[in-house]
Amino acid sequence: MFVFLPRLGGLGADRAGFLFGGWGGYPPIGNYLSPRAVSGYGPRTVVVLGLLTCALGCGDLLAVDTGTPSWVTALLMIPLGLGGSLAMPALTSLMLDSIAAERAGTAAALLNTSRQTGGALSIAVFGALLADDFASGMGECLLLAACLLVATALGAAALLPRR
């Protein structure tokens, strides 16, 4: 979406950047809500719901095309931003709570390295999908991301401990 709006949506970089500026608000909201939700529902539920909300966000963005108003696109991106900002703090906390304190630095480094590697791989795969036909490639990227998020949510539901 960060490339779609200026490239095919006809928005200038300044307007597209303004629409995505709201993404800076999701981490503080998620960091505030996630521990409270974990206290009430447990980390497994928060992680799974956060991942499924991200998948929903990817799925609803499949409806965006060049005729979609930019404000609608911004609204459709809300589940993606909120879902991730809810899931990651809960997952990080769950991981750090499950290891000995003297290994916390190593575990945090492994988590961050895994996230960075995943980000780099996704850029490579999604870039390849976008290279030939940007519009159809965008749909393929969103569908792939949604499927991977659902698979991850199912894995988390199966593997993470219940309350």
Image: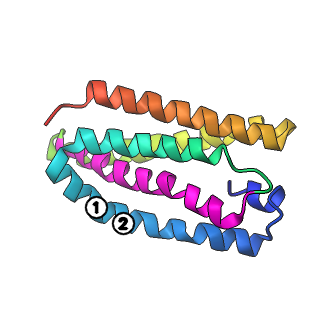
Query: Dot 1 corresponds to which residue?
Result: 33
Q: Is residue 69 left or right of residue 122?
A: right
Q: Is residue 110 left or right of residue 10?
A: left
Q: Nearer the viewer, residue 161 or 120?
A: 161
Q: Residue furthest right?
A: 132
Q: Quadrant of the N terminus?
A: bottom right
| Residue 151, percent from left and from top | 45, 27
Label 1 Cα neighbours within 10 Å, binned few <14 / some 14-19 / many ≥20: some
Q: Is residue 105 left or right of residue 151?
A: left
Q: Nearer the viewer, residue 60 or 12?
A: 60
Q: Do the numbered discs 2 and 1 sit on residues whose CB atoms are within 8 Å?
A: yes
Is residue 26 one of those drawn in magenta?
no
- Residue shown at 57% from the left, 37% from the top: 145
Secondary-structure class at tag 1: helix
Query: Dot 2 corresponds to which residue?
Result: 29
Residue type indicated by callout 2:
Ile
Q: Is residue 29 above or below residue 44?
A: below
Report the magenta stretch's main SS.
Answer: helix
- Residue shown at 42% from the left, 51% from the top: 83
- Residue shown at 83% from the left, 63% from the top: 10
Residue range corresponding to the magenta coloring? 68-97
